[in-house]
Amino acid sequence: MLAKQKSTAQISFYSTFEEQLNHSHPLYILANRIDWNVFEDAFKNHYSATQGKPAKPIRLMVSLLILKQLRNLSDESIVEQWAENAYYQYFGGEDLFSVKPPCVPTELVEFRKRIGEAGVELIFKESIRINGKDADDDDLSGDTTVQEKNITYPTDDKLYKKIIVKCQKIAAKENLELRQSYKFTIKKLSTIQRFRKNKGGAIKARKASKKIKTIAGRLVRELERKLSTGALNTCAMDLSLFKKVLNQKRSDTNKIYSLHEPEVKCYTKGKEHKKFEFGSKASFLLTQRTGVIVGALNFTETLHDSKTLPAALQQYERLMDKEPKSVFFDRGYRGPKMINNTLLHTPKPDKKITATKRKRHKRRAAIEPVISHLKHDYRMIRNYLKGTVGDAINVMLSAAAMNFKRMMNKWKEELVFWALKLLHFFNFYSNRLLLENSK
């Protein structure tokens, strides 16, 4: 159910945030620049007006999502720090300081599910609007990167052992008596695998790996025989996933690399320090002149970079209500030269290239540090959100947070500029007065 509107008619005995906080603080300015009514109008359709428990205010939940990415914090940490930070509370729409946490961390999970990709894209659109004229540039730079998922480095042995553990849990839940638990057998085989680099250890380790795979398959088949019809229907997806892992070969496509994140793909971007990355592909569009992120889209398929362009440009048109004039890419985007009315430029040996075009190709390299900041400062280096929807949400929230942070830094620089200018003005006239008095 929608949250009740707070009444501000009653005068408090305590001073409000308007009186306490520094009005020049970037977070205070950002709180007053964001159009919160956009989110109120868009997200109220996800709530019932009469039924259910009253929900948390929409502005509060949206502000927590923004602050989480902006400060690179987990759900638990942002909820904890909100109760300690007056600027966070003002940003969330509070008038007076509160010592209670705003919500339970899992409520952020439910709110992300509620608003979905379309709701997060609305937050991203607002972050572009905040940047004003800086976001209005017809020339863009584009690039892709891999958003790694929160999984361990996948190996066949790890997957087989996890299948064994999950099968044992299913059997315990359904009160089934397995023919053998294999507890000590797995422990012994794991010990053999540890010494694969010893003399003669490689052959023994390979045999141990085959034995573990055999045990995993045996347990899956035993569950299929012994489970009741209702339990079998409940566990059908899990058992199907287990069989796919057991049957997959090295050269297969669409392999499973994680049991809890089966949509994860393997990407080889040619990096010397990291040959394989496991996650999803993210595409970004950046204004060439000012560096505002105007496109952030996630792809779950292992697409060639040029194949991501139509969807990326469609998102730009949705957000900006216009088509870009030209987009500059690296050589990984070799392919079409034009999509609709947008020119696509990739560098190539050309003695007749103009100085302007050469400069724009050089400017395209500015997107590389932006991607690095998105990963290391705005929670994109490892995605902890569940599923393909979590991938898309994390990409757009990271881009939105960086756009908000860009304006916060700009306001901070303007504040320092005017403070220095005022100091210079004061010093100039004080020195002038001293000279006149000395005469």
Image: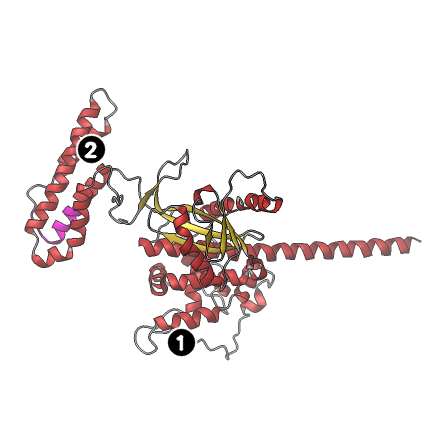
| Residue 273 as seen in the image, left or right of residue 365 | left
| Front position in the image: 357 or 70 | 357
Q: Residues within 10 Å of mark 1 (few under 14, many from 20)?
A: few
Furthest residue in direction top, as rendered = 199
Name the dominant secondary structure of the magenta segment. Answer: helix
Circle 2 residue: 190
Per the image, is 231 magenta?
A: no
Per the image, is 167 magenta?
A: yes
The picture quadrant where one finds residue 156 is top left
| Front position in the image: 395 or 201 | 395
Q: Residue at x 26, y 24 (%)?
A: 197
Furthest residue in direction front, as rendered = 352
Q: Earlier in the sequence, mark 2 or mark 1?
A: 1
Circle 1 residue: 4
Callout 2, which amino acid?
Ser
For the record, the magenta segment spans: 166-177
SS at circle 1: loop
Q: Residue at x 31, y 72 (%)?
A: 53
**Where does residue 43 sit, x and y in percent of width and height?**
39, 70
The picture quadrant where one finds residue 49 is bottom left
Q: Residue at x 50, y 68 (%)?
A: 35
Residue 329 appearing in the image? yes
